[in-house]
Amino acid sequence: MPHLRIGTRGSQLALWQANHIAYLLRARGHEIEITIIKTTGDKITDVALANVGTKGMFIKEIEEALGENRIDLAIHSLKDLPTQLSPEFEIAAIPEREDPRDVFCSVRYGVIEQLPQRATVGTSSLRRQAQLKAIRQDLEICSLRGNVDTRLRKLEDGEYDAIILAAAGLNRLGKRELIREILSIDAMCPAAGQGALAIEIRAGDSHTAEHLTFLDNASARATTTCERALLNKLGGGCQVPIGAVAEVRGQLLHLTGVVACPDGTKILREAQEGSDPSRLGEAVGNALLLVGADTILKEIYG
């Protein structure tokens, strides 16, 4: 079995993800080397993600290493990948997906409704901010950056009354102590691809691709393809207030899409079912555009 070089970010979660895939590959006889690569997003830690405006900010340097043949495969959180990859690269596998939902974390409060008036909630996601404001217009949404440990420490230190995080990261790291509520998709539609990993390789590298085929999960591939098709139709990235989550229901996919004003005053929601992931994603994206998503998004992009 060949020696494979994995590229990853250096956060605790990114390393968990890389080591998880490395474990599965080693079980098949591969010798694995992990290379930590610092990305633009890791270097800019004092600015809210929505204000950075750099697509692919968590993958650029990793893709450079892949393109220069310094690594053989890159492991990303799928939601960090732009919906349109450079022709140089392809997604070889999307492993079994974790819970895509968001969670409410707090030291003192059990659910969002229990928060006092003007409570501080930490998140740097416009998507989360918009949907929180739709639930509780009075909440003070404060910027929150850093890895999972940093964010939890800030919560425990009393900098925030609550924070919103992805369930997947906390589940993977075994850090569930401060989860108080798993937020329903109706209340907090997740980001496209949330909870899924992407294994990226050089386009046409069939030798590496064949060793990764066993990691590709049909359900994860279908649901995330659907969500990313919606995101692509709307021209969005991971820093805009767009939510998309697909579920397999029998022989069909059910896709829910959300576009929201950052202040929470307007939430557009559409849901449809279909069998073709890409077509379904485009259809729900079109439906959102027809009810005014383009107006909201133009304002944000502007």
Image: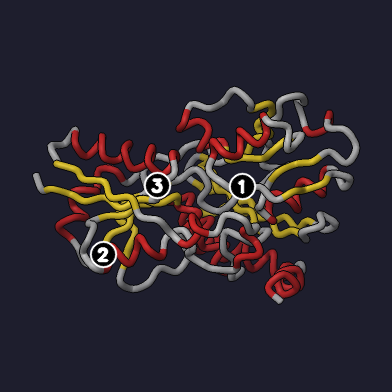
Q: Who's the residue at 30% across and 40% down the image?
A: 21
SS type, badge 2:
strand
Label 3 neighbourhood size at 10 Å, few (<14), some (14-19), many (20+)? some
Could you tell me the amino acid type at mark 2? Arg
Label 1 neighbourhood size at 10 Å, few (<14), some (14-19), many (20+)? many
Q: Nearer the viewer, mark 1 or mark 2?
A: 2
SS type, badge 1:
loop
Label 2 neighbourhood size at 10 Å, few (<14), some (14-19), many (20+)? many
Q: Which residue is mark 1?
A: 190
Could you tell me the amino acid type at mark 3? Gly
Q: Which residue is mark 3?
A: 10
Q: CA distance from mark 3 to mark 1?
A: 24 Å
Q: Is the Cβ of the residue at disc 1 closer than 8 Å to that at disc 2?
A: no
SS type, badge 3:
loop
Q: Which residue is mark 2?
A: 202
Q: Nearer the viewer, mark 3 or mark 1?
A: 3
Residue 167 horizontal side relative to residue 295, left or right = left
Q: Nearer the viewer, mark 2 or mark 3?
A: 3
Nearer the N terminus, badge 1 or badge 2?
A: 1
Q: Is the Cβ of the residue at disc 3 closer than 8 Å to that at disc 1?
A: no
Residue 225, compared with residue 152, is above or below; it is: below
Can residue 117 be seen here? The reply is yes
Residue 216 at x, y percent in the picture:
32, 46
Residue 296 at x, y percent in the picture:
75, 68
Residue 227 at x, y percent in the picture:
53, 56
Nearer the N terminus, badge 3 or badge 1?
A: 3
Residue 164, compared with residue 57, is above or below; it is: above
Q: Who's the residue at 56% across and 35% down the image?
A: 167
Q: Who's the residue at 77% across and 59% down the image?
A: 262
Residue 251 horizontal side relative to residue 5, left or right = right
Could you tell me the amino acid type at mark 1? Pro
The quadrant in which the N terminus is found is top left
